Image (spheres, rainbow, N blue to C red):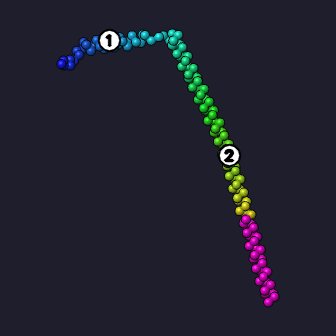
Amino acid sequence: MRSFREPSLQERLQLAAKARQAALAKLKAQPAADDPEVIKRRQEQMAIAEARNAREAEKAEKRRKEAEERAAREAIEKAERERLAQRAAIEAVIRGEALAAEQKAKRDQRYAARKARKSGG
């Protein structure tokens, strides 16, 4: 079995130079900005972005409409609750007045009975 051999400085420099050459070749191999393929790919990306923006706008519009509908429902429900609370308050006042009138009638009846006993007896 062979033992591992450390690369020398010269070998490391050669490997680094080869890596730089490979990176440069890869960079040069890329098509130019006015290449038809690059233009076509850029147009496709723009079309995708426009479609995405359109979908986001539709979603935003839908959320806005739902928020408006929810606000309208909540306003109706609030008005209904206020109406019921007002009705309950009015009924409580009416019941209170009726109770007061009933108590006054009983008091007057007791007073009249007491007066009848005193004057008759």
Which kind of residue does numbered mark 2 sit on?
Ala
Q: Secondary structure at mark 1?
A: helix
Which kind of residue does numbered mark 1 sit on?
Lys
Say which residue label 1 marks: 18
Q: Residue furthest front?
A: 1
Q: Position of residue 60 (x, y in %)?
A: 61, 32
Judge from the rendering whether residue 15 lies leftward or rightward of residue 118; answer left or right.
left
The part of the image, by quadrant, that contains residue 28 is top left
* 105 up-or-down from 53: above or below: below
* 2 up-or-down from 93: above or below: above
Label 2, label 1: how far apart the Cα atoms are? 74 Å
Q: Residue furthest bottom?
A: 121
The part of the image, by quadrant, that contains residue 95 is bottom right
Q: Position of residue 13 (x, y in %)?
A: 28, 13
Say which residue label 2 marks: 75
* 58 up-or-down from 101: above or below: above
What predominant SS class does the magenta segment belong to? helix
Q: Is residue 33 found inside the magenta-colored segment of the image?
A: no
- Image quarter where the N terminus lies is top left
Judge from the rendering whether residue 37 lies leftward or rightward of residue 110; answer left or right.
left
Q: Position of residue 88 (x, y in %)?
A: 70, 58
Q: Residues in magenta? A: 95-121
